[in-house]
Image (cartoon, rainbow, N blue to C red):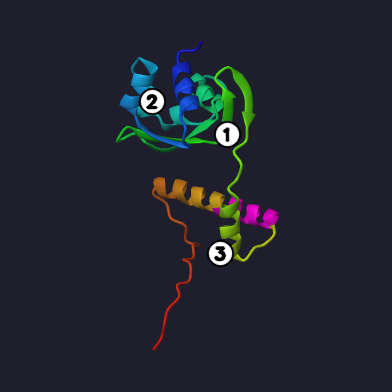
Amino acid sequence: MGKYEPLGDHLRALQGNNWNANFDEIERVLGFRLPKSARDHRAWWSNHSGGNHSQAAVWVEAGWETRDIDQKRERIRFERVRRARSAHSPSVIPIEPDRDLWAEAARITGIKDRGELEQAAARALIQREAARALALMGGTDPDAVSAPRARSFP
């Protein structure tokens, strides 16, 4: 058992799909202090489980990914991306998408075809995350267009 496995066990045991934690909570779960690199380098929290990222391998294997890393406030959000059957089974059961969510997305966008709706959702997510990454680096997107607002005229 690797030294980060208690974190994987903790994540597997959670009932919800999100865990907002601070570094102190994570250290209590682990039973030791996080390394300095966890506080200094955002890449330590990446979801890349290859190479020397044994910590990431634990949460990825447990079916979770990191989101919203705030090293200054020492806070992070873990999000379930798939549900593990048990702590000792590498098999996973995908989380079923909420049918009401797809129906609402179809109603809002007017896109009725599920495949087209999934592509539009993926494009929007990629665009949002790219914009967030750019903003974090202090950049802007000069081609960005704000959504039209409904205005009532007298």
**What's under tag 1, amino acid-wise?**
Arg
- Given residues 130 and 137, the one toward you in this image is 130
Q: Say above or below: 18 vs 86.
A: below
Q: In the image shown, does 52 or 57 lie closer to the viewer?
A: 57
Mark toward the viewer: 2 or 3: 3
Report the Cα–Cα distance between label 3 and label 1.
Answer: 27 Å
- In x, y percent, where is residue 22? 33, 31
The amino acid sitting under disc 3 is Ile
- Magenta extent: 114-124
The tag on residue 82 is: 1
Dot 2 or dot 1: first in sequence order is 2
Give the residue drawn at x 45%, y 49%: 132
Asked if the stretch drawn in magenta spans residue 26, the answer is: no
Residue 51: x percent and y percent?
A: 56, 20
- The reply, left or right, for residue 123 in relation to residue 79 is right
Q: Which mark, by number, is residue 38?
A: 2
Residue at 62% x, 56% y is 120
Q: Nearer the viewer, mark 2 or mark 1?
A: 1
- Quickly name the residue at label 3: 108
Q: Residue furthest top?
A: 1
Q: Residue at x 39, y 89 (%)?
A: 154
Please tell me in which quadrant of the rendered image residue 108 appears. bottom right
Report the Cα–Cα distance between label 2 and label 1: 24 Å
Element assignment for label 2: helix
Marks 2 and 3, the one that precedes in the sequence: 2
How packed mark 1 is, by other alpha carbons closer than 10 Å (few <14, some 14-19, many 20 or more), is some
